Image (spheres, helix red, strand yellow):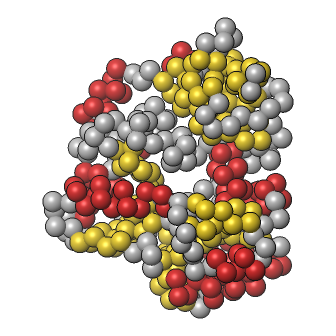
Amino acid sequence: MKNTALTHIHEALGAKLVPFAGYNMPVQYEGVNIEHETVRKGVGVFDVSHMGEFFLKGENALALIQKITTNDASKLVPGKAQYSCLPNADGGIVDDLIIYMIAENEYMLVVNASNIEKDWNWISQHNDLKVVMENRSEDWSLLAIQGPKAAEAMQSLTSVDLSAIKFYTFEITDFAGIPNVVVSATGYTGSGGFEIYVKNEDVEAVWNKVFEAGKDWEIKPIGLAARDTLRLEMGYCLYGNDIDDTTSPLEAGLGWITKFTKDFVNAEELKKQKEEGVTRKLVAFELTERGIPRHDYEIVDAEGNVIGKVTSGTMSPSLGKGIGLGYVTKENSKVDSDIFIQIRKKQIPAKVVKLPFYKG
């Protein structure tokens, strides 16, 4: 198991650590519901240093990104980020990622921890354009400072106006006394905040200053369990659960990041799928009776026929009811459709709903 540069701090804080994507990661400190609430109403800090960072440079960097991703990266300007995915050759998804345009001909790709090697090999294999690629995943740490009070609580640590950094834009600036930190208005919680990219050797000093600056706002460390309940309330896809090598971006509701205005890996097949229509769709559902849906539970219709399966599920801390995502046949995918979740020997009624679950 690898440790992040902050693992010793999590241990000292009494975090429960679990293996995640090859790393020892804090899953919770005080408890999922308390931590979830902290981020929804105040400000909390996640150590997500296990994520991968690739840097692409050169005059063909954009051309390579356009070839390997579904979204249109030509729309990026320096200081802007974009959510996208890497399609595979079989109609599935290698990974989802965020692309940061650092400068002309210079980009940072942030990928999922469990896919670092897979993604690196996939991108390298398509790099016939002499783009200079660097995998700096081992050198960088990432703190997600999330919640509605994040900007206010962190303002004393930087000379840039945090409230002016719009969603999916970023600044490379001073932060907590460290120069050239990437301060990005991104995150996986739906409650606002920032992601702070900093070198491993600086992250402990940054962590300490973040907690010092945020103490009047009752800032707390937050574990990965609350990150999961927060992202699920927003309906954000989690790689390995809701999307993987076998799910197409169109089935997963990611048509909005699949742009056929350019050519990319497997574009023809995906375009054909768009024209012909998909046979299954990722839907959001709420249980209408007590129960907690879990990953891989069967989804059935009123007659008990299997029509799909749950990909993510939990008891929503904000809504106090069971919520989930799952793939179902197209005819059962409309909002307000009645479906049932097979929980042990019971079929618990549920309704297909519009995302996000949590409206804030």
Instruction: Name the residue rendered at 60%, 56% in the picture.
Output: 188
Answer yes or no: is residue 210 visible.
no
In the rendering, at what x and y percent does residue 271 appear?
Answer: 30, 31
The foreground one among 50 and 24 is: 24
Residue at horizontal 50%, vertical 69%?
A: 170
Of residue 160 and residue 310, the one placed in the foreground of this image is 310
**Residue found 69% across the figure and 70% down from its top:** 45
Q: Residue furthest top?
A: 303
Question: Hey, which residue is sitting farthest bottom in the picture?
Answer: 177
Query: In this orientation, does residue 28 appear?
Result: yes
Q: Is residue 23 or residue 335 the one in the foreground?
A: 23
In the rendered image, residue 357, in percent from the top left (x then y), is placed at 70, 39
**Toward which corner of the image does residue 99 lie, by quadrant?**
bottom left
Q: Is residue 102 left or right of residue 146?
A: left
Image-based side of 200 in relation to 158, left or right: left
Q: Identify the residue at image location x=26%, y=44%.
A: 265
Question: Which image quarter: residue 210?
Answer: bottom right
Q: Nearer the viewer, residue 281 or 155?
A: 281
Quarter of the image for the N terminus: give it. Answer: bottom right
User: On screen, 327 above or below 24?
Assistant: above
- Picture coordinates of residue 236 (x, y %)? 58, 46
Instruction: Please state the horizontal and vertical placement of residue 208, each as a whole percent of the image.
Output: 70, 85
Q: How many marks?
A: 0
**Residue 283 vertical placement versus 69 (above, below):** above
Q: Quadrant of residue 132?
A: bottom left
